[in-house]
Image (spheres, helix red, strand yellow):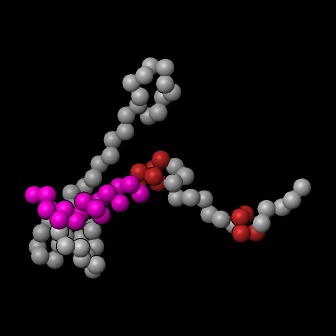
Amino acid sequence: MTEPAPEQSQQSPPLTDSTAHLLARITDQLGAQLSLVSRNGTRRPMHRTRHPDRPAADGGTSAPALVAVAHGSRDPQALRTV
């Protein structure tokens, strides 16, 4: 029997080890991308110093909250997913 290499045994589990972590990552990424689009659909210039959780420096409002909703399969034979 062999022992695992030290670098393999000390790796931290991936951040997507649960549905909550996965949804949090998706929400963060989509929120960052949507913050670059104005309400009329035009692209805003990307500011490196602007934090997505703070209001814009020009007095604008912060980006709206993004809500993700999951649903189960419509197939009655499928396993319950939610």
Left or right relative to 13: residue 4:
right
**In this rendering, is residue 50 above or below 23?**
below
The picture quadrant where one finds residue 62 is: bottom left
User: Which of these two is toward me, 74 or 67?
Assistant: 74
Looking at the image, which residue sits at the far bottom? Answer: 49
Residue drawn at point x = 60 percent, y = 59 percent: 13
Residue 46 percent across, percent down from the top left: 24, 73
Q: Position of residue 27 (x, y in %)?
A: 35, 55
User: Which residue in the rendered view is the most extreme toward the top?
Assistant: 76
Q: Residue 66, relative to residue 74: is it above or below?
A: below
Question: Which residue is depicted at the point 72% across and 63% down?
Answer: 9
State which region is magenta.
Answer: 25-43
User: Which residue is located at x 49 percent, y 24 percent?
Assistant: 78
Q: Position of residue 82 (x, y in %)?
A: 44, 34
Q: Where residue 4 sits: x, y (%)?
A: 79, 62
Asked if residue 8 lies in the magenta stretch, the reply is: no
- Residue nearer the viewer, 22 or 20: 22
Q: In the picture shown, does residue 14 fall above or below 46?
A: above
Left or right: where does residue 48 sit relative to residue 73? Answer: left
Q: Residue furthest right?
A: 1
Quarter in which the N terminus is drawn: bottom right
Figure disc tally: 0
